[in-house]
């Protein structure tokens, strides 16, 4: 019944008068193993009691900063490349030099001081402009001066060496 569970003492099955299966059975093989294990444990304890107690000395820290211990650092060995395609150079010669300037003052510079005038990319450096002019027009630049106009575009004055004539180059380009 319901009240039988609350009573102290050994549990008795409600339907039969037999004790529960766990009570009263002897387990001989396990008991023998336990006895052997107990003898080993006793031997270890006896050995420990005879020897002096050694405690690990606590390391005294002399520095307030804690540095994480150095652990194994393996070299990267990727299974696939980070980028599937090689990145191309975005600033090529055609993007650097956008167009030649054909104003009267620019024509005067071509005729008198052997200088070509171009509008160039805002991010282009003087060396980039020099190389682009060499690749596009097969002329060597002695010096490049740049300025940024009030409208935000960059203008480059490319002074050619004495071996090349700016007027010939301008004719080839089609400025004149």
Image (cartoon, rainbow, N blue to C red):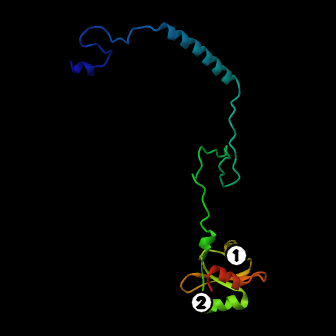
Res 24 → quadrant: top left
> Residue 71 placed where, x, y %?
67, 44
Quadrant placement of the C terminus? bottom right
> Residue 173 placed where, x, y %?
64, 79
Number of other residues with Cα within 10 Å of mark 2, as a class: few under 14, some 14 to 19, many 20 or more: few
The residue drawn where x is 61% and y is 56% is 86
Question: In the image, which is nearer the foreground, mark 2 or mark 1?
Answer: 2
Q: Which mark is residue 110?
A: none
Residue highlighted by disc 2: 103
Q: Nearer the viewer, residue 28 or 105?
A: 105
> Residue 83 placed where, x, y %?
58, 53
Number of other residues with Cα within 10 Å of mark 1, as a class: few under 14, some 14 to 19, many 20 or more: many
Q: In this image, 94 relative to 51: left or right?
A: left
Res 140 → quadrant: bottom right
Res 116 → quadrant: bottom right
The residue drawn where x is 65% and y is 52% is 66
Q: In this image, 29 relative to 50: left or right?
A: left
> Residue 160 placed where, x, y %?
73, 82
Secondary structure, mark 2, is loop
Contact check, label 2 and label 1, Cβ < 8 Å? no
Q: Nearer the viewer, residue 136 or 88?
A: 136
Residue highlighted by disc 1: 130
Disc 2 to disc 1, C-alpha distance: 21 Å
Q: With respect to residue 36, does 89 lie above or below?
A: below
Q: Earlier in the sequence, mark 2 or mark 1?
A: 2
Quadrant placement of the N terminus? top left
Q: Nearer the viewer, residue 70 or 144?
A: 144
């Amino acid at each position: 019944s319901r009240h039988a569970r609350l009573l102290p003492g050994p549990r008795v099955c409600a339907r039969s008068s037999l004790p529960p299966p766990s009570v009263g059975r002897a387990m001989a093989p396990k008991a023998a193993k336990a006895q052997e294990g107990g003898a080993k444990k006793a031997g270890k304890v006896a050995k420990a009691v005879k020897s002096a107690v050694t405690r690990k000395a606590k390391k005294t820290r002399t520095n307030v900063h804690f540095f994480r211990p150095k652990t194994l650092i393996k070299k990267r060995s990727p299974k696939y490349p980070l980028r599937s395609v090689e990145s191309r150079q975005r600033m090529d010669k055609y993007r650097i030099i956008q167009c030649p300037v054909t104003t009267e003052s620019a024509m005067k510079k071509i005729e008198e001081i052997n200088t070509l005038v171009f509008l160039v990319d805002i991010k282009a450096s003087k060396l980039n402009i020099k190389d682009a002019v060499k690749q596009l027009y097969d002329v060597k630049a002695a010096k490049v001066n740049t300025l940024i106009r009030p409208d935000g575009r960059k203008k480059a004055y490319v002074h050619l060496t004495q071996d090349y004539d700016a007027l010939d180059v301008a004719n080839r380009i089609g400025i004149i």
